[in-house]
Amino acid sequence: MSIDSLTLRLGARWPLPVLSPRTLAVAAGFAMLYLSWGSTFLANHLALQGFPALVLAGLRFLLAGALFAVLAVARAGGARLGWHDARLALIGGVLMLAIGQGAMVYGVQHLPSGLAALVCASLPLWTVILQAVLPGERRPSPLALFGLGVSMVGMAALLGSRMDVLAEPERLGAVAVLALAQLAWACGSFLFRRTGRGYSQLWWGMSAQMLLAGVVLLAAAAICGQWQAFAWRDVSTDSALALAYLVGVVTALTYPVYFWLLKVSTPAKVSTFAFVAPVVALTLGCLVLGETVSTAMLGAAALIVAGVVALTLGQRGG
């Protein structure tokens, strides 16, 4: 039997699925979300070689907010934002971006990028904890609680496997700051949802919250003395390119993709970035930065990822 005839017979018995352009676009969107937000930790690590932490975070959101303003003018014309939009911008800009992302950049400054990414995988854990304790929220399902327990065991094992790194108080403090950053983001998400509706103009709203975050972070940098100590001449090409990547790809390009995926897919599927991104970050940390990953750390990472998967499935079915 010739290869051509065998191929035809196999194709008749097990026909290959035909993927529509929309399906391919959704798949490409998920791939971009995973790779972009998984590479955030590497990009921050490189950018921090030339920028102080608060200056880096502030410039990232100030420049991204300006880009969104340009896009908003092109798509929606003039801004028509009301008090409801101002409240959303305050929640998103201060609590989620300035505090949440600003604290994350500080933590990345003192930890290996892969370890920082795994600590940031605790975001769904905080979501379930808040869901369990806040009044008016739907109680977590048994599967979600099981996933919470597995992830907490994995987090404890992760910290135990890296006692060499965490022996320094500054690095242990960075882990605490990263965990608090995830709590701030989770609190912001709950407050965002409880407002009842989103921005009246999405592009202008995203621009407003990023510009606000940039101003708050740069003000904090000035108060802490980081802005005064910063000089553009000390910024290397690699750090400048890393900042450009954070602004253009991670923020200005991926955020719209994220919101588009929320429309065309389900929140449960979109939230899978929480357990794919740490895997991407670990891989990039090993390949690009030469970070070492022990067997114990891999086992702890597997527990965290398995717990977050169970937690996500439990949230979907709960």
Image: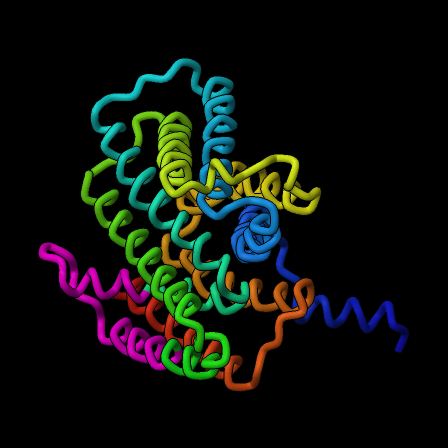
Q: Residue 100, position in %: x, y? A: 35, 50
User: In the image shown, does 71 or 55 lie closer to the viewer?
Assistant: 55
Q: Answer whether residue 24 is visible to the viewer in this image.
A: no
Can you say whether 178 is above or below 299 in the image? above
Q: Residue 133, position in %: x, y? A: 14, 63
Q: Is residue 14 magenta?
A: no
Q: What is the residue that sits farthest to the top in this orientation? A: 78
User: In the image shown, does 95 or 170 lie closer to the viewer?
Assistant: 170
**Residue at x-position 64% and y-position 45%:** 239
- Which picture quadrant has residue 197? top left
Can you say whether 165 is above or below 253 in the image? below
**Residue at x-position 64% and y-position 41%:** 235
Can you say whether 42 is above or below 287 in the image? above
Query: Does residue 14 appear to the left or right of 76 in the view shown?
Result: right
- Which picture quadrant has residue 210? top left
Magenta residues span 125-154
For the C terminus, the image quarter is bottom left
For the N terminus, the image quarter is bottom right
